[in-house]
Structures are given as structure tokens and as C-alpha cells.
Image (cartoon, rainbow, N blue to C red):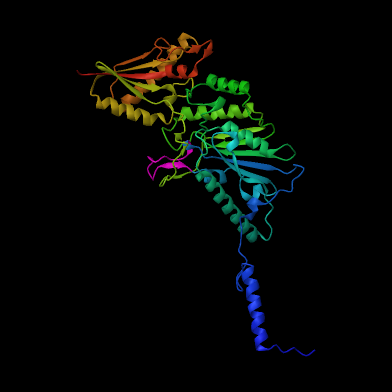
Amino acid sequence: MPLTRISPRRFVALALTLTAVMASSGCGAFDMPTARPCTWLTSASDDAGGTRRRTVVLVDRSSSTRPDKAAAPTARVPDWPATLLAAPGLALPELEGQLLSVAGFDGTRATVDWQVDRVPVTPAKGNETLKQDRRDARRGCLEKRLRQLSATEPSTDRTDVLGALAAAAEQLAPGGGRRRIVVATDGLANTGCADLRSAGFDGVPEIEAIVRRCRTAGELPDLKGAEVSLVGIGRTARGRAPSSPQTAWLTSLWTRLCEASGAARCKVAATARSHAAGKHTGSGKKAGKTEPEVAFPAVSERPAGRVTTLTLPGSVLFATDSAELSATARGTLDDVARRVGELHPLSVAVFGHTDSRGSEQHGRQLSLARAKAVRSALVQRQIAVATVRGYSDDRPSCTPEYRDGAPDYAAMACNRRVEVAVTVRR
């Protein structure tokens, strides 16, 4: 068939027409399609029957998990994205075939922000090299989304971990398949039944009282059948860090709250990855208010005449019902020894105290053993101690320990203490 000859004028017209069509479509003649490797995070689920395995990931973005303006750029703060990506079960090969949800949370159940909403993680295809490349790309997308959530300013001035878990339970929805919730949080709730602002951070009875309060208030989430992991407990980014016994108490508290919620498995850990705070640009404020701080008991100093008394809370130094100094007590005792030296003492006495629970004999033995442990630590730091005594609950610092028949666990924790009395020259 003979070719049709196109005149130069008609050829120019066709070329101009093609150019116009390409321009109107938003593509240049030599443009390549734009790669969008993270579109899988917005894919719609086809799991109408609820039979797929599901994983929910929650990121605590409340003020206590974020460095304030006073933090040095080199200060170490929790790195929630790195912590979550290293958590068991969150590697990309393990997530394949599941529905994934990811959200940030702070003060209420209503502010849980589902940035990834029941997205199917399809199995990577191809040879092993191609599979790994695709999984690495997906991991990069997930890390980017987690960092966006972690950097987002909190929408309230509170922290409600139980509310976030309740929202996660709704996200899991009923149905077959494995159900998992992984939460990165410091665990410092300051609202609702688990409000820790007046906690003593010492003792199983206080933990059980909080669990009973949450059950009575109807604030325990329904986690029946879910596998729950909380990581980063006690790893706050601002304020005084908890001691080892206080961290252990926090870990026990969230384990009990999880168990009381009916979870099939509860794994609570204080471990978390960290990074340098860098330059903090966020305000950490909402409507002119800063988040109420959950403060851990710390050493206090009280001068009275020639005697200055340094008070060391039991939860800073010892585990419950123990006279063995914790690993983190060393720094506290270093500070106490330094302060005693600055006072140029004539004499130093160490007194142990407990609360009113248990027998008087047990209380006296425990308080004396704790006082002796502190004396030994001070002697190792070149501080001579002349007197050591154990007083049990004879000399309470906070009263009453019971209000309307109910124990005040913060008052009890206040009374479990070791005092270092320093007599100075006039």
C-alpha cells in the first residue's frame, strides 16, 4: 500500500496538536511516570469479613515524650519510630498478609489520629533481591509516617494511654485472625482513673488500687483476645527520670492494667531507642496550657537550726520490701554525699522509716536494714556516719495514711523514706 505524503504545513499542525494534548494532560513529551512508593499506606482494605490478621501501632505524642526548650541539643530522648520498627512483629516480612493501622495519641480517645487505616500489607513479589528492595522501600515509608506522627504537636494538654488502647481495640474490630497492639509510650498518664500525678510509685497495693479504680470507673478497654505490647515505659523526655524501682513499678502497673483488660498476652518493657534532642521547635502547648507533670519523688532538703535533713524516698533507692540498693541509686547517693560534704558536718546520722502496713517488728527490721545500706554507701563515699536507726512507722512524715477507710498510697510512699541528718557548726 503506497504511503500518503504529508505536506510540511500539515506535519507542523499535527505536531502542534500533539504538543497541546500532552500539555493539557500535565505531562511533557519526554516525562516519565512519577514513582509513588508510599501509596500502599493509603490502600483500601478488601477484608469485609474481618478475617485477616490485624496490627495496630500507637505513638505517644504527648508533651512528656517530647523535649522542652530547656533541653540541651545533645540530650538523649526517646526515638519512638526507631523503637517501634525494632519491636518484635513489626518487621515488613512479618506484617505481610495483615491489615495495618497506625495512629498518634495524646489526651483523649477522640484525638487518636489514624494516619494509616486498616491498610493491607501485600506480600512482596519477585526474586529475593527484588523482594528485599520492595520491603526496604516500604519500611522507609512506614518510618517516615511514624516520624511525622511523633513530630506532630499534641492536640490536648493531657495523656490518656487507656483511652488510646480503647481506640485501638475498636480499630481491631471483631473477627478471626491474630490481633496485635503495639504502643510506644512513657506510660505517664495524667487523666482519668490511671492519673499518676499523686502516685507514690512504690508497692503492689497501690497498683491494685489503681486497677480497681479503673474497673469501677468503667475505663478499662476491652482487649479480649488481643496481644498487647507497650515499649518505652518510664522513658520520659523531660523532667526527672524515674529510678529503677520506680520504673519497675510503672512496668508492673501497665502489665496489671493490660491483664485486667482481658488481653491474651501482655508484654510491657522500659526499653526504647533514643536520639539527640537537637533543636526543639515545638511549643508543647495547647490553648496556653502545658501538660500537668507526673513527678517522681526526689531527694529533698530541710534545714532546721543546726541540723539539715536530706530525705531520700524509698522508691528512689529500693524495690518494694527490699533493702538492696537499686542500680540507679548510685547517682542519687553521689549527690547526697556531695551535698553532705558541702555542709561541712560535725556529725551525720541515718534514719530509716516505713509506713504503717505490716507488723511493727518487720517495719523496724526493714527500716534499719535500709538505713544501714545507705550508711555503707555514704562511707564508701568518704562520709563518716555516727548514728544509724530504724524507726518503722513511729515518725510519719505524711498523714493520714488512710482517708475514710481507704489507703492513701501517696502518703504511704512519702513515709517510706531514709533521712540523712547532718549537724553543722553554728
* Image coords of residue 136 (percent x, y): 59, 55
Q: Is residue 248 above or below residue 62?
A: above
In percent of width and height, residue 356 lies at 47, 11
| Picture quarter with the N terminus | bottom right
Q: Which of the 4 quarters of the picture holds residue 212?
A: top right
- Counting from the top left corner in percent of width and height, residue 217 is at 61, 22
Residue under the point 66% across and 77% down: 17
Query: Is 148 left or right of 279, judged from the image as shown?
Result: right
User: Is residue 147 positioned above or below 342 on the image?
Assistant: below
Which residue is more in the foreground, 282 or 368?
A: 282
For the point 43% across and 33% down, which residue is it? 241
Query: On screen, 39 above or below 326?
Result: below
Describe residue 48's horizontal placement relative to residue 85 as left or right.
right
Residue 275 x/y as whole percent: 45, 45
Q: Specify the segment rendered in magenta.
A: 64-78
Image quadrant where residue 102 sits? top right
Locate the C terminus and report the quarter of the image it occupies: top left
**Position of 186 compared to 179: left or right?**
left
* 119 lies left or right of 148: right
Foreground residue among 323 and 246:
246
Q: Is residue 346 visible?
A: yes
What is the total number of numbered labels drawn onto the structure image? 0
Residue 23 shown in magenta: no
Q: Taken as a whole, is the magenta stretch helix, strand or loop?
A: loop
Direction left: furthest residue: 426
> Does residue 357 appear in this view?
no
